Amino acid sequence: MERKLFTALQGEHAQRLNDTLSKQGFRRSQNVLYRPSCSECSACMSARIRVADFQPSRTQRRIMRKTGQIRRNATSPWATEDQFALFRRYLDARHADGGMADMDIFEFAAMIEETPIKSRVIEYSRPRMPGERAGSLAAVCLTDVFDDGLSMVYSFYDPDLVDLSLGTHIILDHIAIAREAGLPYVYLGYWVPGSRKMGYKAGFSALEIYKGGQWQDLGDPAAHRAELHPLSMDPIAEQVARISLPEARPHRD
């Protein structure tokens, strides 16, 4: 049974709240911040890459060469029909039985556009082919901008271009963007030990996880299997008590 700890993200201090709680393992979904708080395990751990220490593997360098002609375009968080068409193809091919499988264009637009903080939609297009007027949309990532990094909220890509490893390309490109902007981290969402769908995240060097109330190097992924045990979970009251909130501004008389 899944359980989450969450809070509304709204008002003039939304960005400060998001920045503060994201450093404590929270993620954003539209105007809500949440963190897994299941009663039987603590396997879902927030993961981020230390940009300064990241070194691509041989496989990742090969992917960078293969995707050298992919073009990036960062835009405001505004949904388009082309994005939704690609999103539907991606879900049908990769996550047909997932929780987002029934999303319509209005729900998709809400996912992209309902953001109370600084967000961007980063589009990736392949080169124009003979007979085409423009290059085709290959991948999209909804990205939040924190005071200490970039957070990849949700990404999807053309399932017909699986040989390009576009999911990995998007992460590598976000590392490059963060490095150019002087931001120290790229937040990848949650990593779950033993999960095949989440396993790719452990393949990035300089990966940290939020565990036991602090960020630490991932180390050996197999060493975290104990987090699946019910006794690894602290009572929710203790979890709430340990959350740090941004300091309120002093009141003026």
Image (spheres, grey):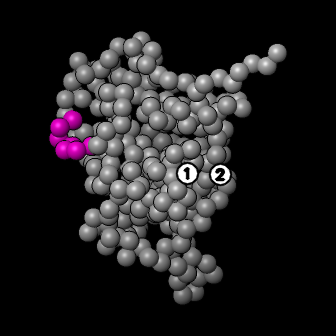
| Residue 180 x %, y % | 52, 62
Q: Is residue 101 magenta?
A: no
Say if 4 sits above or below 193 in the image: above
Q: Is residue 140 visible?
A: no
Residue located at (64% from left, 46% from top): 118
Please say if the residues under marks 1 and 2 sit with CB atoms less than 8 Å apart.
Answer: yes
Distance from Cα at disc 1 to Cα at disc 2: 8 Å
Residue extent of the magenta highlight: 218-224
Q: Which residue is mark 2?
A: 77
Quarter of the figure with residue 215 = top left
- In the rendered image, the residue lying farthest to the right is 253
* Amino acid carrying mark 2 in the image: Pro
Quarter of the figure with residue 208 = top left
Instruction: Using residue 71 as the reference point, say whether residue 95 is left or right of it.
Output: left
Q: Which residue is mark 1?
A: 142
| Residue 63 x %, y % | 35, 70
Residue located at (31% from left, 73% from top): 62
Q: Which residue is at the front of the view, 185 or 86?
A: 185
Give the class, few, some or many, for how many residues have Cα within 10 Å of label 2's Cα (few <14, many ≥20): many
Q: Is residue 142 visible?
A: yes
Give the quadrant of the C terminus.
Answer: top right
Give the class, few, some or many, for how many residues have Cα within 10 Å of label 1's Cα (few <14, many ≥20): many
Label 1 secondary element? strand
* Amino acid carrying mark 1 in the image: Leu
| Residue 235 x %, y % | 35, 13
Say if 241 sits above or below 23 in the image: above
**Which disc, if any, is residue 178?**
none
Q: Which residue is at the front of the view, 79 or 221?
A: 221
Residue located at (40% from left, 28% from top): 36
Give the quadrant of the N terminus.
Answer: top left
Residue located at (36% from left, 32% from top): 214
